[in-house]
Structure formats: structure tokens, C-alpha cells
């Protein structure tokens, strides 16, 4: 969610130490703007770039972990808002051979540097444009060096919002990891006619049906506050090797998210009826 909609005491793009979450899976993002690194025998995969400063942190964090950013081959995005897409340009600059994948609805906005968003309009939301090399479809799989990511187009927060899933080994056991796009309804989003974009409310409804039933054991997301990264990181450092295995927390998050969406939709529907 854009910083302007938040009341924060710690900057969302404040530096955060990179660390290993599970076998071949690392956190390389900022305090709240998340980014992830997957290592494979054929190169690296990066999920999201944060904002511009976070993008630079992502590159630095990859180096800190002992990997060469130039070996990033696959770059994927959860959604086109500046706090997840502005840093993509920084990653591609360090890894010119990386192939950027994005959804059909979000790709044109990434390539326009944030211009064209139906709600976030103005220079404060714009960023360095990044060329999208491939359009992904719902259910499409991307494989590199034996690691396979599956794209799930889950629109609502943006029209092309994409949730990513993949298997990951935690403490010797294969688990299903999920990187949540976003399900929040930004202040000012219209879920009733005229909707912020046509079909927005139906998209939120449909996406929640997926999220509420998706395999989600290692719960991750585009913002660290969605899954309490700091507390889980502290538990990991304390010796809890499966600290990020949290299917109950994932389910509870989506139940609360759906309730918040329905509450806002009904509020807007009642306000429209009362006019």
C-alpha cells in the first residue's frame, strides 16, 4: 500500500538485513517493502523491487548474501504500484540479462513508470519506467534451474495484481510458499458505480475465493506487515527453524481481509442507496 495512505514511525523503505528464510529462499527487501531472492542452479530469481531506494537495497542485499546480481535471470512483480515496481529498474540495471514478467493489466503501467493507474494519479506515484519482457497469464508457470513459480492473477488492489506460489524446503520438509500481492482496499477506492476500474468489486470477490483456498504454508507478501516478518525473523534467529511456516496465520489474514473488503463494500452500497 502506498506510503501516503499510512501513518508510520519507521519508513517503509528503511534498510533491513537480508537473511535466509528457507532452503534457497532469502529476504532481500526493506523494512516493509518486501523483496525475495530464490537461488537455482541456473541463476537467481527476484520477486519484487520495492520503491527506488529499496531496489538499490535489493541489489546490495544480494551481494551481501554472497551472490552476484548479474546472475539474476528472472524478475517477477506482484503489482505495479510504486512501492513494489519502482525498484525493478534498479534490479534490471544491475542484472541486464534478467527477464521481467508481469501481468497484462499491470505491465503497461510499469512500462509507463506508474502513469495510467486508475487511482494513483500524479508525479508522487510515478517512477522510472521498466520494460516488461514477458506477459504472464493466470496459472502460468515459470521455471528456472529446477525451481518453478506459479502466477495467480488476483486483481482488485490493482487490475493485474499477481500472487506467486512455489514449493520450498523448510527444515527438510517441502512446503508451499505463497507471496501475497495485496488485498487491501485503499482509502478512496470506489467499489460501487462508478468503480475505480470497471469490475473492481467482482475482482476482489473472485480473488478472495482463491486466497481463502490457496495452499499457503510459508506465508509471505508484498508488505512485511501483512505477515509480521520482524517477529518471525526474531523467532528464526532464536532457533525456530520453521518460523515462517504459518498456515494458520495465512488463513486468518485472508479471513480478516475478506471481512474488511465486505464491510467496505456494504458501507459504500448503503451510502449509494441512501442518496
Image (cartoon, rainbow, N blue to C red):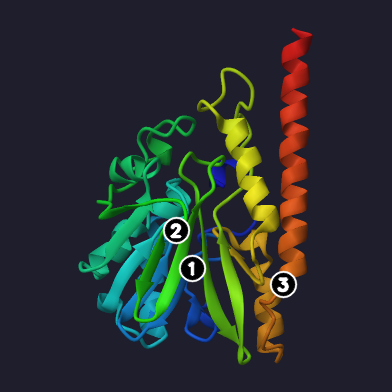
Q: Tag 3: Cα neighbours inside 10 Å, few (<14), some, or many (≥20)? A: some
> Residue 64 location in percent, x, y?
40, 84
Disc 3 and disc 1: Cα gap in Å? 20 Å
Residue sitting at the far top: 275
Pick whichever of labels 2 and 1 is earlier in the sequence.
1
Closest to the camera, between mark 3 and mark 1, is 3
Task: Classify 112 as above or below 17.
Answer: above
Pick whichever of labels 3 and 1 is earlier in the sequence.
1
Pick whichever of labels 3 and 2 is earlier in the sequence.
2
Confirm whether residue 122 shows in the render: yes
Name the residue nearer the viewer: 114 or 47.
47
| Residue 246 disc label | 3
Taking the image as shown, residue 38 lies to the left or right of residue 90, namely right
Closest to the camera, between mark 3 and mark 2, is 3
User: Which residue is denoted by mark 2 in the rendering?
Assistant: 50
Taking the image as shown, residue 112 lies to the left or right of residue 30, namely left
Task: Classify 85 as above or below 274.
Answer: below
Q: Tag 2: Cα neighbours inside 10 Å, few (<14), some, or many (≥20)? A: many
Q: Residue at x 73, y 32 (%)?
A: 264
User: Which residue is denoted by mark 1 in the rendering?
Assistant: 29
SS of the residue at dot 3?
loop
Q: Residue at x 51, y 25 (%)?
A: 198
Amino acid at each position: 500500500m502506498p506510503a501516503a495512505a499510512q501513518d508510520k514511525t519507521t519508513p517503509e523503505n528503511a534498510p533491513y538485513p537480508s537473511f535466509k528464510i528457507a532452503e534457497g529462499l532469502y529476504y532481500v527487501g526493506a523494512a516493509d517493502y518486501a523483496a525475495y531472492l530464490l537461488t537455482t542452479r541456473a541463476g537467481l530469481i527476484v520477486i519484487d523491487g520495492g520503491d527506488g531506494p529499496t531496489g538499490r537495497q535489493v541489489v546490495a542485499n544480494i551481494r551481501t548474501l554472497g551472490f552476484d546480481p548479474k546472475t539474476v535471470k528472472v524478475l517477477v512483480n506482484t503489482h505495479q504500484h510504486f512501492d513494489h515496481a519502482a525498484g525493478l529498474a534498479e534490479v534490471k540495471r544491475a542484472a541486464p540479462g534478467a527477464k521481467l514478467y508481469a501481468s497484462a493489466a499491470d505491465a503497461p503501467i510499469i512500462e509507463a513508470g506508474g502513469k495510467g493507474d486508475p487511482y494513483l494519479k500524479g508525479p508522487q506515484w510515478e517512477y522510472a519506467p521498466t520494460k516488461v519482457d514477458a506477459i504472464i497469464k493466470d496459472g502460468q508457470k515459470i521455471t528456472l534451474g529446477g525451481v518453478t513459480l506459479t502466477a495467480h492473477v488476483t486483481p482488485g488492489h490493482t487490475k493485474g495484481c499477481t500472487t506467486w506460489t512455489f514449493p520450498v524446503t523448510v527444515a527438510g520438509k517441502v512446503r508451499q510458499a505463497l507471496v501475497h500481492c495485496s488485498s487491501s482496499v485503499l482509502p478512496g477506492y470506489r467499489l460501487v458505480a462508478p468503480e475505480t476500474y470497471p469490475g473492481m468489486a467482482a475482482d476482489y470477490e473472485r480473488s478472495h475465493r482463491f486466497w481463502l483456498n490457496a495452499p499457503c504454508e510459508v506465508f509471505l507478501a508484498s508488505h512485511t506487515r501483512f505477515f509480521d516478518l520482524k517477529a518471525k525473523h526474531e523467532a528464526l534467529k532464536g532457533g525456530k527453524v520453521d518460523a515462517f511456516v504459518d498456515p494458520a496465520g495465512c488463513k486468518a489474514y485472508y479471513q480478516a481481509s475478506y471481512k474488511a473488503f465486505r464491510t467496505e463494500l456494504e458501507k459504500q452500497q448503503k451510502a449509494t442507496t441512501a442518496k
